Amino acid sequence: MAGDSNLKVLNALDVAKTQWYHFTAIIIAGMGFFTDAYDLFCISLVTKMLGRIYYHVDGSPKPGSLPPNVSAAVNGVALCGTLLGQLFFGWLGDKMGRKKVYGLTLMIMCICSIASGLSFGRDAKAVMATLCFFRFWLGFGIGGDYPLSATIMSEYANKKTRGAFIAAVFAMQGFGILAGGIFAMTLSAIFNAYYKSPSYEADPFASTIPQADYLWRVVLMVGALPAILTFYWRLKMPETARYTALVAKDAKRAAADMAKVLQEDIEAEQQKTDAMVSRQGDYDLFSKEFLRRHGLHLLGTTSTWFLLDIAFYSQNLFQKDIFSAIGWIPPAQTMNALQEVYTIARAQTLIALCSTVPGYWFTVALIDVIGRFTIQLSGFFFMTVFMFALAIPYQHWTQPEHRIGFVVMYSLTFFFANFGPNATTFVVPAEIFPARFRSTCHGISAAAGKFGAIIGAFGFQLLAQSQDPKKVDAGYHPGIGVKNCLIVLGVVNLLGLLFTFLVPETKGKSLEDVSGENED
């Protein structure tokens, strides 16, 4: 069907061999996700240090820590900004064009990443308020990168390897996580070598050197560098042919732009373009016609991303237990501030290296072989199995002799999240909607995911508190306990598996065939 009714410029993109411009687009789009992951990851490396610097209590047996409300704000405000950015820039990408707003999101990320490290104030409250302000707008820029990067990559790619290219952009998050951990480890090791300081239990005040206030700022700011390096190339990218032809209705410009990219002559078909656009109808987003054609698809992409992120972002609940269980992080009072940053960075980098990064690249390698539907369905299935396997015999796993098994099961859960719905929920919304709604619908799907992330990161932090009031963390109320939380997360993953059946398979198909733009 595509060969007969699709435009020649779009056919040329669909059947193009993998070329240098594909890899250039992956790097340009991927650097935004590198910065995204770096910025969201590195704050967790320095929150303990922020507590030591700004919330030190004289005479306390343990180092200072961020109060629960401050900790939630510092870690969560970027997620709130991301949710709004996904909705706003997703809509703007369909109204103004992908390219026009693509540089803007990167500029916001770069400025706010640097500004986060320059957070100022005379007291702890002022510094934290400034940090939260800039991290909100950092998240806003990051949010815009989700729909725009996915849409641009899907519209540039050929149909044979489109899934791998979009997934490769998303997989750059793995390198951002690794870079954040490695840089924090290196910098804290250098500072510790130059500025010797005792452990907290030996000398509480001297254990946090004045120079530590520079370390966390540098760690936050460095994430902007890769994004700055690709800023010029974002501005030089031509608008995607699918937006220019099917939304802006300029077939001549679309053919000229892609002729330069593909280095071949392409005929401009203005009459055929007009006919194709008129054949789609002029229905609006959320109209009866839209809901008839794409309503179930949008329900499928939003619900699966929402449910996946509840489970995915709840992982931080169990990391501290895992790290301490296998001896990766000794008690805080036995270390100075710099040593604590180093050990946390080392532990989280190892987790990323062992489960997160391999999962991403398994998806890149296999998504166009076995398909999006199979990867997402099997990912949710194994996440469900491992969550219940952790939850039902939870007391068994808490025994010291069984804790290595707990770590293995935990790592497998998040391996199958990344070689599963964490990647496919990003890929599929960029493929199944018409060009004029593609960026908006991806933004809506991604925002549903971020809402799930906020529930996973903070709702479950409250729920996972012990049912015994004596064992509850300072500043929290009793919850339902970790075991019951794991059971709830197992049910969440099972629901994700069921909602996956609303999402169509897109492997090897033209975007116009998948979205119905070639149909009368």
Image (tube, helix red, strand yellow):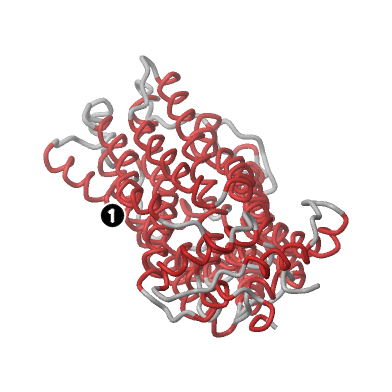
Up-down: is 217 above or below 280? Answer: above
The x and y percentages for residue 226 are 32, 51
The x and y percentages for residue 147 are 57, 54
Please tell me whether mark 1 sits on a helix, a strand or a loop: helix
The x and y percentages for residue 131 are 43, 29
Q: Residue at x 68, y 43 (%)?
A: 479
Up-down: is 497 above or below 326? Answer: below
Query: Viewed as shown, does residue 449 lie left or right of 43?
Result: right
Q: Residue at x 21, y 30 (%)?
A: 211
Snapshot quadrant of residue 463:
top right
Q: Residue at x 34, y 40 (%)?
A: 220
The residue at which mark 1 appears reads as 182
Snapshot quadrant of residue 241:
bottom right
The x and y percentages for residue 190 are 16, 45
Q: Residue at x 29, y 42 (%)?
A: 334
Q: How many numbered marks appear?
A: 1
Q: Nearer the viewer, residue 88 or 242?
A: 242
The N terminus lies in quadrant: bottom right
Query: Viewed as shown, does residue 196 lie left or right of 275?
Result: left
Q: Nearer the viewer, residue 404 or 173?
A: 173
